[in-house]
Structure formats: structure tokens, C-alpha cells
Amino acid sequence: MEIMKTALIVIAIAMLTGLSYGQEMPDSDPWYFSAEGIRTAYRYQQSFGERLRSPVRGRDCLLGKQRFVGSFRGKNFSAPCRFVTETIRHIKEMLVAGAARYLFPLDADHAHLAIPLELWEKKYRWLPKDTLLSALLEEPTLAALYHTAEHLIVVDGNTKEGNEEIKKWKERRNVLGFYDGRAIQILPPDPRGFGVGAPASYYTVGGFAFLASPGGELSLFMDGKAIVFDISLDIGDGEPLPDAALKTAAN
């Protein structure tokens, strides 16, 4: 329940800050917030927000180390630093491309792992659940499906930013990242603004969370500033990712 707890705290902050800044929340759906409300809530998360549970201890991966110790449901395992460094690359490329702006639940905070469908059937389908994640992280053809702009409302007269720029942010919210060095791929948007699934040639299984916080383990640099954050593989026993049911109104 750790991810849901963090999301609820952030949403509450966004509602309070939005009201204090005089921003109207849409009466029909309290799930969504203006770009300005999301920006204000993110300032709080960056300065005072809690860290994720069981964050990946991957700082040494940024210093040239080849492997790190991962954790999932209380069990530790060795994993390649490629997962850490490539995930950081994905996040930075999303920020540069305007597909994401903030690393927290109101924008981007999770990814679904994906594996080529043919390879899943041949190699991974029958692996025990307690060893599947560690095996997937070793796989060079692994991919990650990101959904951003989770709570963004596009049309909002109170924002200081043009609606066209916000629309572009929303349209770029479905991103596929690769762990073999290829650049991220921004997937075609759902016309209703929902999250989309991975391409038909992939099978999605499990995932991970990430969250900016002042005590984070990892970092990247954007526009001369450091963004400090955590990645966690331990999303809880049976706990679904925020949009596990893809293409639903909740996305």
C-alpha cells in the first residue's frame, strides 16, 4: 500500500495548494489537476516528500559499478547496473522530450516492465514468481512502458501556460523505454487521453516505481540542476501499479 499512500498524500497536497492559489478543480472529476496545481505540489514533494519503500541501492552504478543488490518482497538478489543507468536515461529523455515534467504520482512515477512476446513464451513464462523479476532484469531486450501526466487536466483557464503546450504534454504520456541503448519511443496517444498498452509484440509483467524526494539515492541533471529520486522494485505483495488496468477511465 506504500505507493497508494504516497499518491493520496500528494493528491491531498495538490488539492490544498490548488485551492490556496485560487485554481478551480473540475467538479465532475477530482482525479485531475491543472498544470499549475501539479507544479506547486511537486515543489512540496521535492523539498519535504517521503522516500519510496525499499529503494534500489544503485548509487554506485553511477560510479562505474557493474551490479547492485535488488530487493523484491523481502528477498535480495544481484542485478545488472544496466537497469539503473538505463532507467535514469529513460527518465531524462522523457523530461527532455516534454513527455514528463515531474517525478511523482501526479505526473510520472511508475513503469510496467515488458518483454518481447515470443521470448516470454520461450524463456520466461514458466519461471517461478520469486525468480522472475531477477531474470527479467538480466534480459537485454527488456523494455519499460511509462505513463505520465497521470492527473493532468488539459483544458484549464486558470493556468499560466497555453493549453496547446499542456495538450502536447498529455499526448506524449505513453512512452516505451529500452534497455539496449535505443532512444525512448513515444507511442501514439489514445484519443481519449488514456494510458495505452505496450505494442502487441510485447508482454507486460510487473514493474517498478520512482519518486523524487530530498533524500533520494539516485540523481540526474537537467538545466544545470540535480533531480534527486529513488527507484523501487518492491511495490508490495499483490499491489497493482496505479494503472494496471490499461485503457480505463482511471488513466
Image: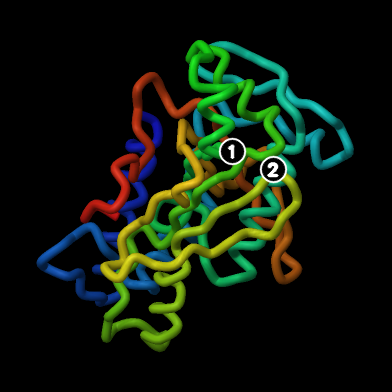
Q: Earlier in the sequence, mark 2 or mark 1?
A: 2
- Image quadrant in which the N terminus is located: top left
Q: Which of the two residues, 52 or 200, is positioned nearer the viewer here? A: 200
Q: Residue at x 71, y 37 (%)?
A: 140
Secondary structure type for disc 1: strand
Residue at label 2?
218
Tell whether label 1 touches label 2 (CB within 8 Å).
Answer: yes
Is residue 225 shown above or below 44?
below
Q: Is 96 situated left or right of 242 in this image?
A: right
Question: x%, y% of residue 29?
Answer: 16, 62
Checking the image for residue 42, the label placed there is none
Q: Horizontally, is 235 left or right of 229 in the view?
A: left
| Left or right side of 157 for 180 | right
Give the residue type that dot 2 points to.
Leu
Q: Give the answer, above or below, for where 111 lies relative to 94.
A: above
Q: Say whether residue 149 is left or right of residue 54.
A: left
Residue wearing tag 1: 231
Count up the numbered dots.
Answer: 2
Residue at 46 percent across and 38 percent down: it is 204
**Which of 134/27 is in front?**
134
Q: Residue at x 87, y 39 (%)?
A: 63
Q: Position of residue 187 (x, y in %)?
A: 49, 63
The amino acid type found where label 1 is placed reads Ile
Give the quarter of the figure containing the C terminus.
bottom left
Please tell me which residue is depicted at 33% across the width and 55% down the height of the picture: 13
Disc 2 packing (10 Å; few <14; some 14–19; many ≥20) = many
Q: How far apart are labels 2 and 1 at the CA level?
A: 8 Å
Q: How far from the left and from the top, in percent, is residue 50?
A: 48, 39
Q: Residue 69, image x and y in percent? A: 71, 21
